[in-house]
Amino acid sequence: MAAEAATQEQSKAAEEKQTNCLACNKPIKKIRRYYRNGKFYCTKRCWMKFIETEKNKGKEEEKK
Ligand SMILES: [Zn+2]
């Protein structure tokens, strides 16, 4: 039980620091990180992918 709580806290802390790429959700290493608009991605490609995903989300909302 205690171990479970510790794991949850760790994942929460990781989210707050944003150490994972928003596109592929891989942990970002300092060297490879790509910073855009206040968020971190592991590569430029992942940043583009994330933007495309956000665009598609918006389009789907408009269709409704
Ligand atoms: Zn990525």
Image (cartoon, rainbow, N blue to C red):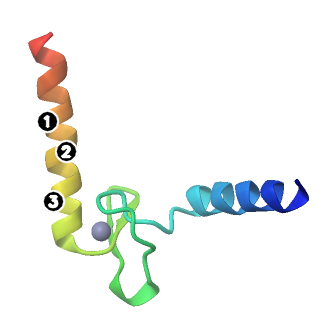
Query: Which element is circle 1 on?
Result: helix
Number of numbered callouts drawn: 3
The one nearer the camera, 30 or 7, is 7
Compare marks 2 and 3 and give the one earlier in the sequence.
Answer: 3
- Disc assigned to residue 40: none
Residue displayed at 36% across by 78% down:
33
Residue contact at pointers 2 and 1, CB within 8 angstroms: yes
Query: Which element is circle 3 on?
Result: helix
Compare marks 3 and 1 and give the one earlier in the sequence.
Answer: 3
Q: Residue furthest bottom?
A: 31
| Residue that numbered label 3 is attached to | 48
| Residue that numbered label 1 is attached to | 56
Q: Residue furthest front?
A: 1
CA separation in Å, label 2 and label 3: 9 Å
Residue 41 % position (x, y):
33, 67
- Mark 2 or 3, closer to the camera: 2
Residue 50 % position (x, y):
23, 53
| Residue that numbered label 2 is attached to | 53
Residue displayed at 39% across by 62% down:
25
Q: Residue furthest top?
A: 64
Residue displayed at 33% across by 56% down:
37
* Relative to 37, residue 43 above or below: below
CA separation in Å, label 3 and label 1: 12 Å
Near mark 2 (Cα within 10 A), the count class, few <14, some 14-19 or many ≥20, is few
Quarter-of-image position of residue 49: bottom left
**Type of the residue with mark 1:** Asn
Near mark 3 (Cα within 10 A), the count class, few <14, some 14-19 or many ≥20, is few
Picture quarter with the C terminus: top left
Residue contact at pointers 2 and 3, CB within 8 angstroms: no
